[in-house]
Amino acid sequence: MKCTASGQPPANSEESSVPTSEKLEDGQFKDHWVLCEMERSMGYVRPVRTKYIHEKCGSITTMGRVIAETYARDPSFYGSTFCCNCHGYFPVGEHGEFIWDDDSKEKVGT
Ligand SMILES: [Zn+2]
């Protein structure tokens, strides 16, 4: 069961990578899937972090709280994330292109 970051009903089915195919002017999708509040409330396995660095360009992107909480509950929930400088989505995970903007320098999605 997935919920939307916006709290709005999704236009797409849960099998789709995003709840709506609509994009904002900067190229980011208008809405994203998140774990529902009940699932998120079951406990985090990572800290809640909202800023990450795209290693390719060095820019910092800030994400919304519910998406950050979804990463904290289930680090492998997303396969990619947005860079506000490159205006696109790039891979996360062990071989991904992003690290958290904190002392851990952990890869986003691990
Ligand atoms: Zn970038």
Image (cartoon, rainbow, N blue to C red):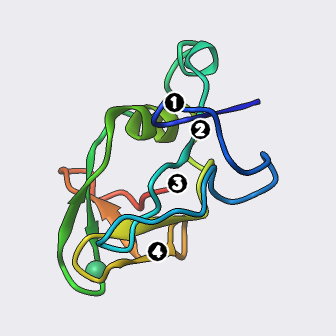
Residue shown at 18%/79% (left/top)? 58
Residue 18, position in %: x, y?
A: 62, 56
Residue 21, position in %: x, y?
A: 60, 63
Which of the two labelled residues, at mark 3 and mark 4, occupies the earlier sequence position? 4
The numbered dot on residue 110 is 3
Tell me the amino acid under the disc marked 4.
Tyr
Which of the two labelled residues, at mark 4 and mark 2, occupies the earlier sequence position? 2
Which of the two labelled residues, at mark 1 and mark 3, occupies the earlier sequence position? 1
Q: Is residue 29 above or below residue 35?
A: below
Residue 89 shown left or right of residue 25 in the figure: right
* SS state under label 3: loop
Residue shown at 51%/67% (left/top)? 92
Q: For mark 4, what is the residue?
A: 89
Q: For mark 1, what is the residue?
A: 45
Q: For mark 2, what is the residue?
A: 74
Tell me the amino acid under the disc marked 2.
Asp
In this view, the mark in front (4 or 1): 4
* SS state under label 2: loop
Cα distance, mark 4 to mark 2?
A: 19 Å
